[in-house]
Image (tube, rainbow, N blue to C red):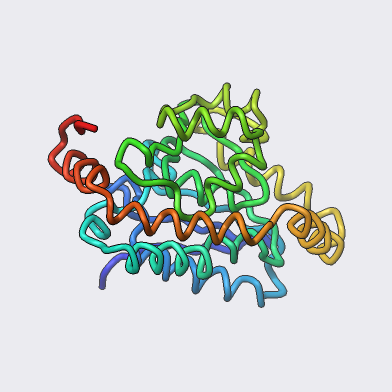
Amino acid sequence: MSTPLVHLHVEDRIATLTITRPKALNALNTAVINALHKHVVDLDGRDDVRVVLLTGEGEKSFVAGADIAEFATHNQQEGQALAQRGQDLLFTRIANAKKIYIAAINGFALGGGLELALSCHVRVASDNAKMGLPETSLGVIPGYGGTQRLAQCIGKGRAMDMMLSAKMIDAETALAWGLVNAVSTQDELMAEAKSRAKGYLRNSGDAQAAVIRAVNAGLDHKGGYDTEIVEFGKRFTSKEFVEGTEAFLDKRRPSF
């Protein structure tokens, strides 16, 4: 029997979803997105779950990004469909979930990995975590809501610099900027996330769901997400996207 791509554990009204691709640094691909989608839909309907912890297996990576090889040969239409489907199935679904989602960032959260953490309502990180949206180094842009949610979270100036430079930031910088809510050691990360979850359990779940809806109503400007999808798709017609993805897969520096 093959190992599931996402493992679910439920205890004391807290669910833990763990992405189990440690050899691939828990990189997102279509299969992982589909598996997470099924769990998100299921958990939204469960009365025995109030809070969901989302993490990656191992100590190196939460999610190190999307699986580049899976979409390196896409055309514009396929690129737009990839972004639209990912947003609809998973990222927007988590952001609008009835349950509270806490991302426990254990290591690298890059590209789609940081976008996944940003779709969660709260984020805690281990002190070895590195976060970034490095898509411009591949000749593409974030396509799973990152251009919108990062700016909403840390402000336009800092978000612009992170995306334009493609640089990573460390956990302490992320804490200072408000990208994460707490930082702990790797060994204490899940305990920190669970402690926060238990604190939320003391309050009204219905009211918390209403808070999520109210906050999202003021932040989710659909035009921004739609523009991101279109611009993401357009990158697939660019020579620089071809160079960037080929360089990544060949493990060399791109020539832009």
| Number of disc labels | 0
User: From the viewer's perspective, is 209 left or right of 115?
Assistant: right
Q: Residue farthest to the left?
A: 250
Q: Looking at the figure, which quarter contains the C terminus? A: top left
Q: Looking at the figure, which quarter contains the N terminus? A: bottom left
Residue that appears at 86% across and 55% down: 203
Q: Nearer the viewer, residue 220 or 123?
A: 220
Q: Position of residue 77 (x, y in %)?
A: 34, 68
Residue that appears at 70% across and 43% down: 195
Q: Determine whether 200 is above or below 94 in the image.
A: above
User: From the viewer's perspective, is 225 left or right of 230?
Assistant: right
Q: Determine whether 25 is above or below 216 in the image.
A: above
Residue that appears at 30% across and 55% down: 236
Q: Nearer the viewer, residue 141 or 237?
A: 237
**Where on the picture, by quarter, is residue 33?**
bottom left
Q: Position of residue 41 (x, y in %)?
A: 58, 74
Residue that appears at 42% across and 69% down: 35
User: From the viewer's perspective, is 124 left or right of 135?
Assistant: right
Q: Nearer the viewer, residue 242 or 123?
A: 242
Q: Determine whether 150 is above or below 94 in the image.
A: above
User: From the viewer's perspective, is 251 left or right of 213?
Assistant: left
Q: Position of residue 112 (x, y in %)?
A: 43, 49
Q: Determine whether 105 is above or below 176 in the image.
A: below
Q: Position of residue 43 (x, y in %)?
A: 61, 71
